[in-house]
Amino acid sequence: MREEDPIHAVRFPDGQNGWMVTRYEDAEKVLKDPRFTKDLSKIYGGSMDQMSVFTQNMLFSDPPDHKRLRGLAQKAFTPKMIAGMRDRIQEITDELLTAMEGRDQVDLIDEFAFPLPIIVICEILGVPSADRDKFRLWSNSMIEGTSGELGATVYQHMNDFVQYLGQWFATVREQPGDDLISSLIQAEEEGDYLSERELYGVITLLIIAGHETTVNLIGNTVLSLLENPKQRKILAQQPELVNQTIEESLRFNGPVEFSTSRWAGESFEFQGIELKKDDLVVVSLNSANHDRDQFAEPELFDIQREKSPHLAFGKGIHMCLGAPLARLEGEIAIASLLDRFPEMVLAVKSHELEWRPGMIVRGVKELP
Ligand code: HEM
């Protein structure tokens, strides 16, 4: 498709007409082009009301709202703030690794790749540690809900989640701390800067992004290393290549398959295609990251690749806010895991692994 029909016409299951973009050059252009809108209210109007508690955030808004909403969360995710978390991330990693010692077999997703980013994002947000399991259930449910019909269970989980947030916000209002949630609530209380719906929307986005992505970065990187023993050996001999390994894993087996939706804000010609106003466009990030016009031998997992300007974190104004955090977690997780368990092997055949359903996240359900 990338070579023969790179901007492929698609009729989406909900009846919308749209396009799937698969080449690197086109993908980068879409992600940076302000003629595409991400503002759901411009497309769905009032019919979004039921969902808008989850979607009034930076990822589904255009400037100037985008800048305001991103700016509020940005200060917790600057490279400097994230670098300050290194020791704590190492400590959590070491505890999880110690709990796996002396066992014949573990599920690395359940015992390592999942808990690490969850504990970290919960600490950034100030979520009580006893409630982490509930967040995991709700977040999984909402992501899987995006891949099909919203079943009764998903709605129930969404309702439980909104109720939980309401109660939690009330407690924080009474006793604010120095976490991100307290500063967002303060911004909401101080006037016009952040509406209550936006407060829900931003927190929901951070919880989902913090739960559903880095787990797959860790899982997919371990899997690629297990499947490519030569690369694993190079990394064991040159541990300083760990950051390059993370970048190659993001390119080779990126945790986010597709960008979120964009719509043509007007009718215009884009790379030879006549787009009509409101046409839906999605970018296949993983396809772009395997484009041979951009990457030599893209189907090779090569941790010594010199340059890897991959699109795994997106591009343009919506480029991932959590990228410095995800990179640091990935680096610490992979380096520490290989150091502690240098002899680990996959306990099943690769083709027996089951991949998570849905169009957005790419990762295995279990990694024994
Ligand atoms: C946006 C990927 C981890 C927070 C995005 C986008 C991508 C992405 C591709 C842009 C989507 C688009 O333009 O349609 C990833 C990957 C991750 C990761 C691959 C892990 C390896 C995180 C983490 C957080 C986070 C840990 C925070 C806790 C966000 C936010 C946005 C975003 C808030 C929206 C930014 C905006 O609209 O301005 N991410 N993400 N992400 N990500 Fe991540």
Image (tube, helix red, strand yellow):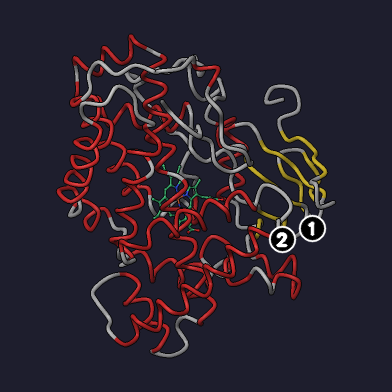
Q: Are marks 2 and 1 in contact (CB under 8 Å)?
A: yes
In the image: residue 155, left or right of residue 200 = right
Which corner quadrant holds the C terminus?
top left
Q: What residue sits 41% from the left and 23% below the top?
A: 223
**What is the residue that sits farthest to the top in this orientation?**
230
Q: Where is 113 relative to 47, above or below? A: above
Q: Which mark is residue 351?
A: none
Q: What residue sits 72% from the left and 60% below the top?
A: 265
Crowding around mark 2 (Cα neighbors within 10 Å: few <14, some 14 to 19, many 20+) is many
Closer to us: 118 or 217: 118
Q: Position of residue 250 (x, y in %)?
A: 43, 33
In 3D space, how far apart are the residues under numbered discs 2 and 1 (Cα atoms)? 6 Å
Q: What residue sits 31% from the left and 49% below the top?
A: 325
Secondary structure type for disc 2: loop
Please name the amino acid that badge 1 sits on: Lys
Q: What residue sits 80% from the left and 38% below the top?
A: 9
In the image: residue 296, left or right of residue 73 = right
The residue that label 1 is drawn on is 277
Q: Position of residue 242 (x, y in %)?
A: 26, 28
Q: Position of residue 13 (x, y in %)?
A: 80, 47
Q: Earlier in the sequence, mark 2 or mark 1?
A: 2
In the image: residue 116, left or right of residue 205 = left
Secondary structure type for disc 1: loop
Q: Where is 96 relative to 146, above or below? A: above
Which corner quadrant holds the N terminus?
top right
Label 2 C-beta lies within 8 Å of the nearest ligand 1 atom = no
In the image: residue 35, left or right of residue 89 = right
Crowding around mark 1 (Cα neighbors within 10 Å: few <14, some 14 to 19, many 20+) is some
The residue that label 2 is drawn on is 265
Q: Position of residue 258 (x, y in %)?
A: 60, 41
Please name the amino acid that badge 2 sits on: Gly
**What is the residue that sits farthest to the front in this orientation?**
103
